[in-house]
Image (cartoon, rainbow, N blue to C red):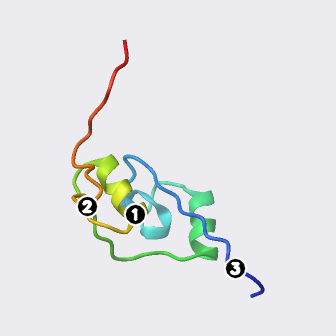
Amino acid sequence: MDGQPNILLLEADQLSASALTCYGHLFVVTPTIDRLAAEGVVFEDAYCNFPLCAPSRFSMMAGQLASPHRSLGQRRRVCL
């Protein structure tokens, strides 16, 4: 491979691996995700380090637990 690899990170809300054909679901049809899985990397084991969406995503992108980057909640600020 020449140069640096192309890396595509997909994150989806409310999507369980058990609902995808590439992870063994028999009835749901997911051809595009199945093709991505066949041509890329499929992770069989995973760990989520925070039970809330935003802090968990921040942690994955930062490579740290939620406490160092201080995103410990799902705060929504509304500007009036």
Quarter of the rendering containing residue 59? bottom left
Residue at disc 2, secondary structure: loop
Residue at 25% across / 61% down in the picture?
A: 68
Quarter of the rendering containing residue 17? bottom left
Q: Say if 12 sits above or below 23 in the image.
A: above
- Of the numbered discs 1 and 3, the one sitting upstream in the chain is 3
**For the N terminus, which image quadrant?**
bottom right
* Marking on residue 4: 3
Q: Residues within 10 Å of mark 2 (few under 14, many from 20)?
A: few
Residue type at mark 1 is: Ala
Residue at 30% across / 51% down in the picture?
A: 55
Contact (Cβ within 8 Å) of mark 2 with mark 1: yes
Specify whether 73 is left or right of 14.
left
Q: Residues within 10 Å of mark 3 (few under 14, many from 20)?
A: few
- Of the numbered discs 3 and 2, the one sitting upstream in the chain is 3
Residue 60: x and y in percent read: 38, 63
Residue type at mark 2 is: Pro
Specify whether 22 is left or right of 48.
right
Residue at 63% across / 67% down in the picture?
A: 35
Residue 42: x and y in percent read: 49, 75
Residue 25: x and y in percent read: 42, 63
Residue at disc 3, secondary structure: loop
Q: Residue furthest right?
A: 2
- Of the numbered discs 2 and 1, the one sitting upstream in the chain is 1
Taking depth in this image into account, of 10 and 42 the one nearest to the observer is: 10
The residues bearing labels 1 and 3 have C-alpha atoms spaced at a distance of 21 Å
Q: Which residue is mark 1?
A: 62
Residue at disc 1, secondary structure: helix
The residues bearing labels 3 and 2 have C-alpha atoms spaced at a distance of 30 Å
Q: Which residue is mark 2?
A: 68
Residue at 60% across / 65% down in the picture?
A: 8
